[in-house]
Image: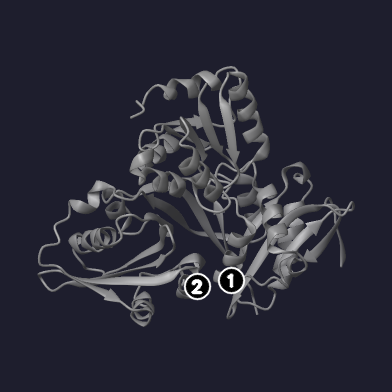
Amino acid sequence: MSLIIIIEDNLPNARLADKVLSRAGHQVVLAQDGEAGLMKVMEMHPDLVLVDLGLPDMDGQTVVALLRQQTELDHIPILAFTAWPEHAAQEMARAYGCDGVIIKPIDTRTFADEVGAYLSTKAVP
Amino acid sequence: MIAFSPDAGSLTAISTARYSFDELAEIYNAGRVDYIVPMPMNGRRMAEYIRAYDVDLERSIVAVNADGDPAALGMLSRRDQRAWITRLGVIPERRGRHVGQFVMEALMRAASDVNCVQLEVIEGNEPAYRLFVKMGFELTRRLVVLRRPPNAPTAQLVPLDGVLIEQMDEAACLEALIQRDQPISWLEEAESMRKVGTLTGLRVTLVDGSSGAVVFCRLPFQLSHVTLIAPPDADERLAMSLIAATHRTFPKYDTKLENLDAASRFVPIFSAMGYIESFHRIEMIKHIAP
């Protein structure tokens, strides 16, 4: 079981992602804005973080930039979670240090596997 | 005020001054929930936005339907004889009944004493663009929003040996902003920038004596509204040095550049310095006959 933090302000989206990942055996923690998400990630050191690029208090890019400046969190995979066109999302996410992108709306049949693929890509120190 | 529009059903325009910032943020977010670039806000961010961009809460409206539920939001800002329409959005399940037109007509009535009304629409939002054309707005130019992550390596690639870098105080920043390339979007006007964050600037003089400035708003984790000021005939090394000096001085800041003219001479230089295109906006204007 892995601990996954989802930073997403859109509750229906967050709950759906939570449901699918929980069913796949992961423990999921939700944060509805950037500040709450940053605090939860720093406190809980999850196995993976999903970050919506549009958050109500600060942009998702800023959240990722702040997380990537914390060396003790460097091993945690971060995935951008966005409805942006895929090419633009990939470019933006890569530049900010994300490990990948999940395009919304999610496909509930494949979402858990897509996320799971990133759980083993970074070794825990 | 009860208003009736041919297809909008019974809608009432209620002044946004009767709503809290949290309520306005909630209505705004609901109207943009399905946008590709939704840019949600919380109450605090909404309050900052209203203050920075001179939103007139008395003249801005929430359109409420017959059941008393908010259907749309539209905000109007005023500066001298100009107005700016912003934060316009119709809640998805209430679209398709000319609600957007109802809001626009109410805002245009509220702006009837100005010389011109400006607005921007995200490129690709065709229904909104068609509405604005129908309302008499004309396209003026294409704008680009750029982002740059902290520590993008390009800032280190521009040599600054022998380059003089001086910090500018707020008065010097405001003075420099007057010399910018024209026109300037509402978000980037000096009246906006001085209220968004701590106005910060650097003056850079190259070895050959050419000189320019970069002015931006400094927020807790972000540099925003980055603006280059350089003579029209300046070598591109000056612009590159201005950008490099900014990111060497503030290496840990995420950076956002709002509404740069997509045809600006600086766009390729920003791109070469690690800035990424986030999305485009279309700027539009309607002149109002006296």
Say few, some or many: other residues with alpha carbon within 10 Å of mark 2 (under 14 / 14 to 19 / 20 or more).
some
Which residue, given by chain and number where applicable, does mark 2 sit on? B195
Q: Is residue A78 visible?
A: yes
Mark 1 on the same chain as mark 2:
yes
> Where A39 falls versus A100 (above or below)?
below
Chain of residue at mark 2: B
- The picture places residue B120, in percent across and down from the top left corner, at 55, 58
C-alpha separation, residue under disc 1 versus residue under disc 2: 7 Å
Q: How many marks?
A: 2
- The picture places residue A89, in percent across and down from the top left corner, at 45, 37
Mark earlier in primary sequence (1, 2): 1
Residue B85: quarter of image: bottom right
Left or right, B195 with respect to A65, comes to right
Name the quadrant of the C terminus of chain A. Answer: top left
Left or right, B56 with respect to B96, comes to left
- The picture places residue B65, in percent across and down from the top left corner, at 85, 53
